[in-house]
Image (cartoon, rainbow, N blue to C red):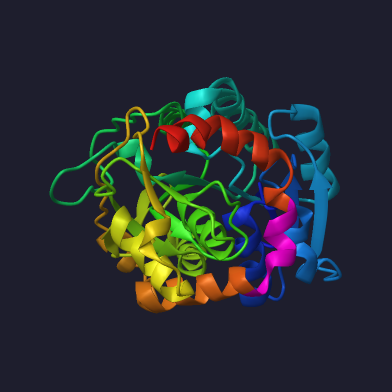
Amino acid sequence: MKNILVTGGAGFIGSNFVRYLLRQHPDYHVVVFDKLTYAGNVKNLLDVHDDPRYTFVRGDIADKHMLADTLRAHQVDTIVNFAAESHVDRSILEPDAFIHTDVVGTYVLLEAARQFGLERVLQVSTDEVYGSIPVGFFKEGDPLEPNSPYSASKAGGELMVRAYHETYGLNTVVTRGSNTFGPYQYPEKVAPLFITNAIEGEPLPLYGDGMQVRDWLYVEDHCAGIDTALHRGAPGEIYNLGGGNERHNIQVTKLILQLLGKPETLIRPVADRPGHDRRYALDCAKLKALGWAPTKDFETRLAETVAWYQQNDWWWRPIKSGEFKAYYRQQYGERLAAG
């Protein structure tokens, strides 16, 4: 592996992974291939813009000609696929974009990888493909029971990855990550939304009773886990990637307010979203056996994340003043009014 194509590399986890790769593997050349939808942002990669080992190409993974030209031009030997529509709420409003990118796009990418004889394809997936688990922990062989158009599209992409491994012998690996947070996360997701709303003194729209449980994973730990699976994972295998930090949504919300010195009166319970999974939890023994483990505790990482958003409002304020406003009104306007 020397020439890595990181699809969706201008997004949240993708851009953090690009920085991680360049830091950990000085002899790699990283090509970011990104459509630059609303959540893709070249500002996420400003700090590597002048690195000669980094190249940016604007493109859609569902565009087979553009993808093939990029693989050929940069002699790509490995793909790490972050490209996805990834927000559950938006998938409920408009599922078609999720099917186009997460299923069709994944197929186009796999077909290109097969035709070019690439060394490996790593598919970045999500714990949401399992559905909800009231007790215990999901293992990689458990059934997939997705409950939203987003998680169903990710499961569909995963199954296509499996088919290309089994049918064509393509060297594939899949990682299923848990709820990720950290710098450069588009503020539609709960952590950056609540942090930035609290900074501005705006209400925090908390779904339902706030007792949903998520396993929180810091983005750099997520990147390290993907890197471990990429280099040490067995062909055709799936690896769970969780932080081991189960928290109720209400706990996380209150901790954000505490870190910012804001009152809990900013919490605004709103109508829950349809098909909202109650609890996710992962057994990550398989990946840990390859040498991976999270680094710092959740409270420390959340404090670092809150501080980042406080210090980098140049990044998130323009985002929240643009397309995001229309989405926010559509998603939360009636809910907040009713609440």
Query: x, y percentage for residue 209?
Result: 26, 44
Task: Say if 259 sits above or below 74 in the image.
Answer: below
Query: Residue 55 lies in what quarter of the image?
Result: bottom right
Q: Is residue 185 left or right of residue 244?
A: right
**In the picture, which quadrant includes the N terminus?**
bottom right
Task: Say if 182 sits above or below 34 in the image.
Answer: below
Q: Residue at x 81, y 34 (%)?
A: 66
Magenta region, main secondary structure: helix
**In the picture, which quadrant includes the C terminus?**
top left
Query: x, y percentage for residue 133?
Result: 20, 42
Residue toward you, 201 or 91: 201
Residue toward you, 204 or 183: 204
Q: Residue at x 30, y 56 (%)?
A: 250
Query: x, y percentage for residue 193?
Result: 53, 53
Q: Which residues are magenta?
A: 311-318
Magenta stretch encompasses residue 317: yes
Residue toward you, 273 or 152: 273
Question: Most extreme residue toward the top, as rendered?
Answer: 96
Residue toward you, 219 or 109: 219
**Residue 165 seen by the camera:** no
Q: Residue at x 60, y 68 (%)?
A: 309
